[in-house]
Amino acid sequence: MQTFLHFFEDDPAPPQGPWTVTRLNREAKNALERQLGTVWVEGEISNLKAYPSALYFNLKDETCNVSCVIFGRAFAMAPSLKDGMKVELFGGAGIFEKRGQFQIVVERIQRRGVGELEARLRALQEKLREEGLFDAARKRPLPPHPVCVGVVTSPAGAAIHDFLNILRRRAPHIEVIIAPVRVQGRGAAAEIAWAVTNFSESARSGFPAVDVIVVTRGGGSLEDLWEFNEESVARAIAGSCIPVISAVGHETDFTTADLAADLRAPTPSAAAEILSKDRVETLASLAELTRRLTREMQARLELSRSRLESRIVSAGFQNPRRRIDDLHQSTAYLLERGTAAVQKYLATLREGTTWTDAALSRHAPSEKLRLWRERLNTLAQRKGMAVEHSLVQRRQRATRHAHALELLGPRQTLARGFTITMDAARHPLTSAAVAASEKEWITLFSDGEVSSCPQKRKDLPDGGVS
């Protein structure tokens, strides 16, 4: 009977313990972001979910899908999306740590195969956004009751007629000054920018002074509204020192002028409604303010009359010399108290300075440095002794293991008179039946080996073979 001994080393323990799930997800997220970074991906939208400040959806192709999320600035610029829409998107590939879910955080999205014109528009808007032209912090509030409004538009368009009709009905007191410009075609953008700049700089240009500028036209296609997407128009609107309302196209139209303006109106009619309040409402508000002002003035007059009457009968008014003497005495008393308070405060400061100097002397950093040096020297000695002790223990353990391996090895067995018989390929022979079929045996002794040829097989009485 042969015994086979197997030696297994203990599994090494992790040097710092196992990772938490949070760390695993964070490490995976960081590695993925380093490897992929940002990518362009195309596919079909599915399972779209819209929230007030974010959009969640899956982007899929014939075989796979990936989770996507849009929020922040990209959410504000995202087009109208729906399930089944083919899109191209740009964003950062990463992992949502809390769920360990692979996703793309979308920075830009557009319909697949978007035209050159729309691509130019997106690039321009991104450029102006990075410059801060669309920042909410730079937008100014409209005056609450404008008296004169400058309108930059075509006088022949339907937009100006709707705008004027609403103003005449709701606020006929508002004066409207129209700067006639082209709103479509080559050169129209330069005229629009010129009119906005002249309204803004009326003292230089000779334009009438206005409270609000309205840039408007009717609806149309992207090509029709393109002049309101030009960089010159956006910069003129953003650089205006007078608040600007952009009312370009229908409610679904969105231009660069809308982003640069201080306020976007969905339509020209909505711009007129924003600028005007109902006449009856305005008159009622003025009447209420007049009543409140009258009551306030009457109350103030009564209070002033009462104070005057009390002053007339007061002792100070009857005998002003006595009042002056009282004030002189109060002034001398306050001067004395102030001088004493200043002297007391200065004494307190001197005492505090003396105490601070003594405390600094007691807590001089040189003494603490000396103590820390001593501690560092002691720790260095202890570290050296600990390392030496650990090395001695490791050497002793290695010697014991080597000795155990030597005792349990086959050479000790051979030294006691046992042998090992092997075939020509030096494989151990474990039965007589197998040995009889071999042409050559190799017998291993403790001091060498001997080759031999097998003789005729002889079966033993108990079933064995010799």
Image (tube, rainbow, N blue to C red):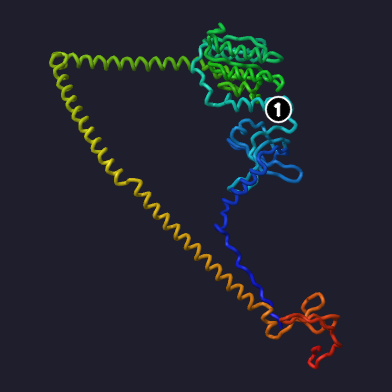
Q: Residue at x 60, y 72 (%)?
A: 401
Which structural element holds mark 1?
helix
Tag 1 residue: 119
Whole-percent x, y for residue 245 in the image: 57, 19
Residue under the point 66% across and 38% down? 38
Q: Residue furthest top?
A: 206
Quarter of image, res 122 = top right
Disc 1 residue type (three-letter): Ala
Residue nearest the observer in this picture, 166 or 193: 193
Q: Residue furthest front?
A: 447
Mark 1 nearby-residue class (10 Å; few <14, some 14–19, many ≥20): few
- Residue ID at (71%, 44%): 65
Front-most of residues 191 and 335 = 335
- Residue 194 seen: yes
Can you tell which quarter of the image residue 159 is in? top right
Seen in the picture, residue 222 relative to 48 is either above or below; the reply is above
Seen in the picture, residue 268 relative to 379 is either above or below; the reply is: above
Q: Where the C terminus falls, by quadrant? A: bottom right
Residue 156 coordinates in the image, percent (x, y): 67, 10
Q: Residue 7: x, y in percent? A: 64, 72
What x and y, as percent, mark residue 69?
Answer: 63, 39
Q: Is residue 272 left or right of residue 35?
A: left
- Find the residue positioned furthest to the bottom: 461
442 or 29: nearer the eye? 442
Tell me which residue sits at (77%, 81%) in the image.
443
For the N terminus, the quadrant is bottom right
